[in-house]
Image (spheres, rainbow, N blue to C red):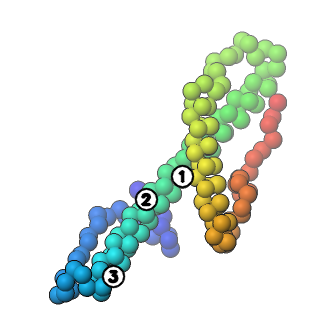
Amino acid sequence: MGSQGPGGLPLVQAPYTVLLLPLGTSRQDPGARSFFLWLQKMQALEREQDALWQGLELLEHGQAWFEGRLREAQQQQLHLGALGENFLSDLHSEPGGPQLAQIQNMNICLQNLIQEKLSRQQKGGTQPKGETAQLGFPNMRRGPTRV
């Protein structure tokens, strides 16, 4: 898929293999039950990791798409500014429309996801290193609006 995992190794999606080992005891045995619950938890964590890797890959593709659209919008803005009062003769594309609504909906979904995660972390009193409690993307370079 082209994405890099930890250590720069390429990501590979592989099917799951679940191995259940008979413990030679009854199903009511606390050791057997504990092992089974541990195995279920490990499987759930593997699925969560796969979903997170998939999400990360989608975000990378999404970021590239957003950056491309941002460049296009900036170019259109520069072009329109250069036209000055003669802009009515060159209205080849109408800004916004259904795509703008979809972008705004996606932004709201992402913001809600991030806010939910941050509020859970703040309630628990823990916050991973490098994350801030405020929303926004400090590493994003937002340029001035050119008119």
Q: Residue 51: which numbered mark, if any?
A: 2
Question: Disc 1 to disc 2, how far (Cα)?
Answer: 12 Å
| Image depth: mark 3 or mark 2 in front | 3
Contact between marks 3 and 1 (CB within 8 A): the answer is no
Q: Position of residue 53 (x, y in %)?
A: 46, 61
92 left or right, relative to 77: left
Dot 1 falls on a residue whose secondary structure is: helix
The answer to whether 123 is drawn above or below residue 106 in the figure is below
Residue 10 seen in the current view: no
Earlier residue among tags 3 and 1: 3
Q: Residue 59: which numbered mark, if any?
A: 1
**Circle 2: is it few (<14), some (14-19), or many (20+) Cα within 10 Å?**
few
84 left or right, relative to 129: right
Earlier residue among tags 3 and 2: 3
Q: Position of residue 97 (x, y in %)?
A: 60, 24
Of the 4 image quadrants, the one containing the C terminus is top right
| Image depth: mark 3 or mark 1 in front | 3
Dot 2 falls on a residue whose secondary structure is: helix
The residue that mark 3 highlights is: 34
Give residue 18's quadrant in the image.
bottom left
Question: Disc 3 to disc 2, how far (Cα)?
Answer: 26 Å
Q: Position of residue 108 (x, y in %)?
A: 62, 43
The residue drawn where x is 19% and y is 87% is 25
Question: Disc 3 to disc 1, how far (Cα)?
Answer: 37 Å
